[in-house]
Amino acid sequence: MMKPPTPPDEHARLLQLRALDLLDSNPDERFDRLTRMAQRLFDVPIALVSLVDTDRQWFKSKQGLDAGETPREVSFCGHAILGDETMIIPNAPIDERFCDNPLVVDDPDISFYAGCPVKAPDGSRVGTFCIIDRRPRELSDDDRVMLRDLAKMVEREIASIQLATIDELTGLTNRRGFKIVADQALAACRRAEQPACMLAVDLDRFKEINDRHGHATGDLALMEMAGILKNIYRESDVVARMGGDEFCVLLTGTPMSDLGRPLAILRDRVNNWNAQTRLPFRLEYSAGVAVYDPVRHHDHDALLRDADHDMYHHKRDARRSKSA
């Protein structure tokens, strides 16, 4: 049996999957309606919306299957998320990759599988929309298009759900989305004994920009700062707008000793932006950092409070130096 390889973007992919807050959630008629439709359209006994987690595939919607999840190492969907095209296995018992797979040898006796990758709004392949039959068969070109259309409908439903976790102005994760992702990321760091840091960033003199130039210009300042933050940090880091002029970044796998470089890059990027912009304002900010301590920081709020405290300490010192 061939186990599914790990995608090269696995860490970022899992962050996006968890940000959706769909794993282990209750049944949802929006998805169940689509799997029932697939059962009828393709005349198959099993249709699934599968989300591929770290070591399991979990079914957000399932028709014709009792199990709520199966191990990732035996999953067909773990293979399907490696590419953008629909993966089709016409006859699994004679396919050397799957012939001795327990899902083929035993219940649910898979012979035919077709799985179309389902993507999160950022493009990460988080799972599949798949159909399964207990007899060998092929999939026509028209059927392939129909399966892709159903997968796109799943993606649209996921996108509508994610809107509740995205800041509409900047496109960054909002406070609600950050809570979901950050607590899960910190739990993963705790289990793996990996370091993490929290960076708190305030856009200084933001009220002055609004008062002097209007709220549309203030919104532009927020979007420019958000763009700089998104471009600096890795896909595996979580960048969020917490509200107003407040931003934060959770850097996983990053010890305090390595944080100087991204902070220096942030400073240089903002300085370069200020030197080149023709907009009627400058970007000024204050930043603070806290290192994750599993004993003291039981969740992201505790870590963020320490980063905020450090930021306000630097902000106060900067004000004192200007008035001296």
Image: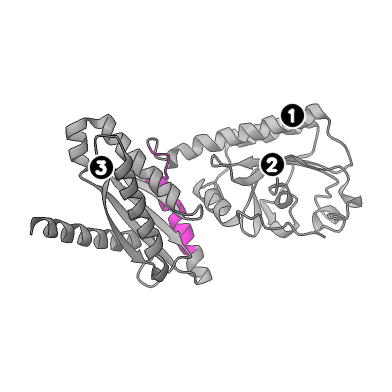
Most extreme residue toward the right, as rendered? 94
User: In the image, is 276 to the left or to the right of 150?
Assistant: left
Residue at left 68%, top 47%? 81
Task: Indicate whether 109 appears above or below 217.
Answer: below
Q: Amino acid at mark 3?
A: Arg
Q: Earlier in the sequence, mark 1 or mark 2?
A: 2
* Dot 1 alpha-carbon crowd within 10 angstroms: few under 14, some 14 to 19, many 20 or more: few
Please tell me whether the stretch drawn in magenta is mainly helix, strand or loop: helix
Task: Give coordinates of residue 221: x percent, y percent.
Answer: 30, 39
The mark found on residue 253 in the picture is none
The mark found on residue 145 in the picture is 1
Task: Kindly report which numbered mark, 3 or 2, lies closer to the viewer in this rendering.
Answer: 3
Q: Quadrant of the C terminus?
A: bottom left
User: In the image, is 218 to the left or to the right of 22?
Assistant: left
Q: Quadrant of the N terminus?
A: bottom right
Task: Give coordinates of residue 39: x percent, y percent.
Answer: 75, 33
Residue 40: tell me if it is visible: no
User: In the image, is 111 to the left or to the right of 213?
Assistant: right
Q: Amino acid at mark 2?
A: Asp
Q: Earlier in the sequence, mark 3 or mark 2?
A: 2
Residue at left 20%, top 57%? 315
Q: Which residue is mark 3?
A: 282
Residue at left 28%, top 42%? 244
Q: CA distance from mark 3 to mark 2?
A: 42 Å
Image marks 3 and 1: residues in contact by CB distance under 8 Å? no
Image marks 3 and 2: residues in contact by CB distance under 8 Å? no
Q: Amino acid at mark 1?
A: Val
